[in-house]
């Protein structure tokens, strides 16, 4: 499971994510007169390092009870305050930013100033603040990690890899660096290196859930489903409320056609207390994939007003709904979904969420390519599906599955268009990643969406 960032009001939470996802050096590094509050804050950082979000909040609350003026827990509380009451939350944010920083550590002052830039909507100042600080304190892992996170979020994978490697050199036991190095290599298709990094992460932190979950994501991409399931179950055994692993099991089982296991996993997650929205989303994925596998296109279209369909998203449910529209000749519906996705992309551009932007662009190219293919415009459809492939990587389980799915449809299109040599070349590439997908493709008669050979 990967951490991620968002901008504007919610971005204040990420200030802390950048601080807390690496191990704490020896000695007191934060400004508080209460040893007990410091202990709670350190426990919060340890929980964050393990990606145990609920525990983070509990420890932060306790730290503030023990020292209400402890600036870093106060800063960490801003996001929750805004979610509870936006107006009061912003007032609290301003109060935190008014803290006298003269007695704080340089690192604490950095995070206050960084938060101030976000509050004042000066995102262009963030890189300079980070670089200025690191020029004075080049080995501060907390800020180095923040810079690496930003590079990763903006799609600057080479720079992110350099920074995470540096982070690992500064402190080999800072496991989060190995986690992110694994995802970077996974995204570039360097699967052997990715596995080495994830296994290093697991070796360092075998009693944490996330190393097992991250390794499981790689195994999904590679079609090593038995190993993936074992990894996810180990994560859940360690931490029954590690929701990402339930999600990954459901993702895997829906795409392998084991819908009963997917439903059982959703029920397990619900029993364990998973968030309601997560249960709804997983149920939607299972139901839509089941209908798609059975070719129940009209049934999918009849779900248009259900809780699974959100115009503000282009997830698998929307992509499958678009396919259903194309399979039934409901071209206006298909084009409406494309237009809604394009509007969403316009809203994203300029936010700095480069990876999300690329994935959304890929999704738009994909659905447009599918429509064009089923309309018979093979040439332009091929261009769209190739563009989608260029925007996608194997950087996580969901994106890897989408990339493989898009590639299979492109291969089907190439065969249908009589471009057998190119099609076989693409199939060979897919086999090199996940041979099981190719076996299923061949068993289906080289069909995914049912194109007729031109």
Image: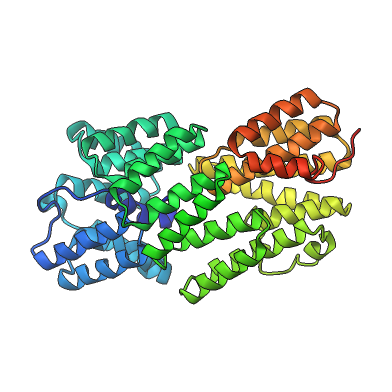
- Relative to residue 239, is residue 260 drawn left or right? right
Q: Nearer the viewer, residue 200 or 45?
A: 200
**Quick check: 333 above or below 162?**
below
**Quick check: 86 above or below 333?**
below
Residue occupying image coordinates x 12% and y 49%: 26
Q: Quadrant of residue 267?
A: bottom right
Task: Give the residue at the far bottom of this rendering.
Answer: 271
Residue occupying image coordinates x 48% and y 32%: 190
Looking at the image, can residue 150 be seen?
Answer: no
Task: Give the residue at the far right of this rendering.
Answer: 454
Q: Nearer the viewer, residue 91 or 174?
A: 174
Residue occupying image coordinates x 86% and y 41%: 451
Residue occupying image coordinates x 80% and y 55%: 324
Looking at the image, can residue 302 be seen?
Answer: yes
* Rendered location of residue 225, percent (x, y): 56, 50
The colour scheme of the drawn protein is: rainbow
Q: How many marks?
A: 0
Q: Nearer the viewer, residue 369 or 192?
A: 192
* Rendered location of residue 317, percent (x, y): 68, 58
- Relative to residue 121, is residue 135 drawn left or right? left
Q: Quadrant of residue 63?
A: bottom left
Q: Quadrant of the C terminus?
A: top right
* Rendered location of residue 49, percent (x, y): 30, 54
**Quick check: 437 above or below 59?**
above
**Quick check: 4 above or below 145?**
below
- Relative to residue 22, is residue 33 drawn left or right? left
* Rendered location of residue 233, percent (x, y): 46, 60
Q: Nearer the viewer, residue 352 or 321?
A: 321
């Amino acid at each position: 499971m990967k951490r991620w960032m968002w901008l504007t009001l919610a971005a204040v939470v990420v200030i802390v994510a950048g601080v807390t996802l690496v191990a704490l050096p020896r000695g007191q590094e934060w400004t508080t007169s209460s040893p007990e509050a410091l202990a709670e804050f350190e426990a919060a950082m340890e929980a964050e390092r393990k990606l145990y979000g609920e525990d983070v909040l509990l420890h932060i609350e306790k730290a503030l009870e023990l020292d209400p003026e402890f600036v870093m827990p106060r800063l960490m509380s801003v996001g929750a305050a805004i979610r509870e009451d936006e107006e009061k939350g912003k007032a609290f944010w301003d109060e935190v930013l008014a803290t006298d920083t003269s007695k704080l550590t340089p690192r604490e002052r950095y995070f206050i100033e960084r938060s101030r830039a976000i509050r004042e909507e000066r995102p262009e100042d963030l890189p300079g603040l980070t670089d200025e600080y690191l020029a004075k304190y080049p080995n501060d892992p907390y800020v180095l990690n923040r810079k690496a996170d930003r590079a990763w979020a903006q799609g600057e994978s080479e720079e992110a890899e350099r920074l995470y490697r540096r982070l690992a050199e500064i402190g080999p036991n800072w496991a989060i660096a190995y986690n992110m190095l694994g995802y970077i290599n996974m995204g570039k298709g360097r699967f052997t290196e990715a596995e080495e990094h994830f296994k290093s992460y697991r070796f360092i932190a075998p009693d944490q859930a996330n190393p097992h979950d991250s390794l499981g994501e790689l195994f999904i991409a590679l079609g090593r489903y038995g190993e993936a399931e074992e990894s996810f179950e180990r994560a859940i055994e360690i931490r029954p409320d590690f929701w990402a692993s339930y999600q990954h099991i459901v993702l895997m089982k829906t795409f392998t056609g084991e819908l009963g296991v997917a439903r059982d996993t959703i029920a397990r997650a619900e029993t364990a207390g998973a968030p309601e929205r997560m249960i709804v989303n997983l149920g939607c994925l299972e139901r839509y994939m089941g209908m798609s596998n059975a070719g129940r296109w009209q049934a999918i279209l009849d779900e248009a007003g259900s809780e699974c369909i959100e115009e503000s998203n282009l997830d698998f449910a929307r992509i499958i709904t678009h396919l259903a529209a194309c399979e039934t000749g409901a071209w206006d519906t298909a084009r409406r979904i494309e237009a809604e996705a394009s509007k969403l992309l316009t809203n994203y551009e300029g936010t700095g969420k480069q990876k999300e932007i690329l994935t959304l662009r890929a999704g738009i190219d994909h659905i447009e390519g599918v429509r064009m293919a089923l309309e018979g415009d093979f040439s332009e459809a091929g261009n769209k599906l190739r563009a989608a492939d260029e925007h996608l990587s194997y950087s996580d389980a969901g994106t890897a599955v989408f990339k493989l799915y898009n590639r299979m449809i492109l291969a089907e299109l190439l065969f249908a268009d009589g471009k057998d040599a190119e099609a076989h070349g693409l199939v060979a590439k897919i086999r090199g990643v996940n041979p099981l997908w190719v076996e299923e493709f061949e068993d289906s008669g080289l069909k995914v969406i049912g194109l007729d050979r031109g």
